[in-house]
Image (cartoon, helix red, strand yellow):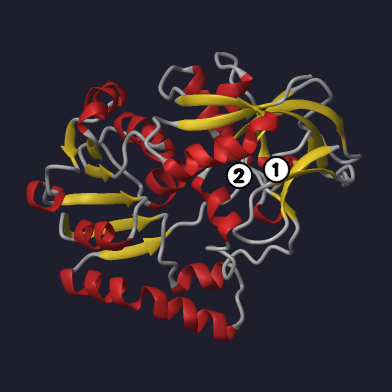
Amino acid sequence: MRAFIVEKYKQPLTQKEVPEPEVGERDVLVRVEAAGLNQLDEKIRTGEFAQILPYRLPVILGNDVAGTVIRVGRLVQRFRPGDRVFARPDERRIGTFAERIAVAETDLAIVPDRISMVEAGSLPLVALTAWQALVERGNVQPGQKVLIHAGAGGVGAIAIQLARHLGATVATTASAPNADFVRELGADIVIDYRSEDFSAVLSDYDLVLDSLGGKNLTASLRVLRPGGRAIGIAGPPDPAFARRQRMNPLLRLAIAALSRGIRAQAKKLGVTYEFLFMRADGEQLTEIAALVDAGVIRPVVAKTYPFDQLPEAFAELADGGHRGKLVVTLAD
């Protein structure tokens, strides 16, 4: 089957014929019809995440999938051939930039009735990231104040909608041309990051979801109320992440050093910082699908590319500036 692989870090993607995926007794073989692009894919390609996600090269990239079930493993109970499914595969089993992929039953969900395969292919990673940040960790409640950075981006566009559904007052950063767009998604306050300093405008926030890192993350700590929480998805990783990944002691020390500065700043301000590396979860994706069918969350697709043009899609991903997600499609 055809697939796009990374043979060496920082090298362009290469399309090659690769062996068919192995289907375990609890796996579902999916014919890929749409696959979203994520910044995580680019970070893996460049080797930026090589220490925390040590893939053995060559590796097939791709962390979002929507498609049709071809066959199921002997012990699979929830899916059958012909089902329309979507997923973010487990981080150890990525590879959606291919014609077929085997996905664990526990990572899959049925595609919402009201959306297309392309829209479904845009959702899993960003929607699960938003859910795990705002619901699972943040426990956002009605009346709380939430700041979501990069509101027009893949994660931001979904997180705004989810935070609004949870009853929060939502602030976001975006460029002036995207201001009306993020307001339509549910943002109450829009900060033009090109002309305004959000940390001078906002205060007493309960939670910040930061997708940018660096100075932006540092400034985000200053808008939190005492006891508030900053959740970063761009890093730096923290000791709790290293424990969950079962890293060796030396790597744990290195990870702790990476985030020591931001954690110390947070402690001094009476707030907390934690790193979120989202995980695959079919049950959570099923709950998200229900919100999509209820009209609470709508996918945001910026542009689609045919499968053979995946390298061009990666170039646009690296350039940034698009609203929502880029998605590659595979014809039958």
Query: Height in image: 129 above or below 50?
Result: above
Q: Nearer the viewer, residue 28 or 227?
A: 28
Amino acid bearing label 2: Asp
Mark 2 — residue?
281
Mark 2 and mark 1: span between their CA atoms? 7 Å
Quick check: can you spot residue 283? yes
Q: Position of residue 214 (x, y in %)?
A: 31, 62
Q: Residue at x 33, y 29 (%)?
A: 165
- Direction from residue 22 to residue 202 in the image, left or right: left
Query: Height in image: 287 above or below 271?
Result: above
Assign the N terminus to one quadrant of the image. Answer: top right
Q: Position of residue 186 (x, y in %)?
A: 27, 26
Q: Residue at x 12, y 42 (%)?
A: 195
Mark 1 — residue?
106
Secondary structure of the residue carrying tag 2 is loop
Q: Which mark is first along the chain, 1 or 2?
A: 1
- Direction from residue 235 to residue 31 in the image, left or right: right
Assign the C terminus to one quadrant of the image. Answer: top right
Q: Nearer the viewer, residue 219 or 188?
A: 219
Mark 2 and mark 1 in contact? Answer it, CB < 8 Å: yes
- Direction from residue 207 to residue 287 in the image, left or right: right
Secondary structure of the residue carrying tag 1 is helix
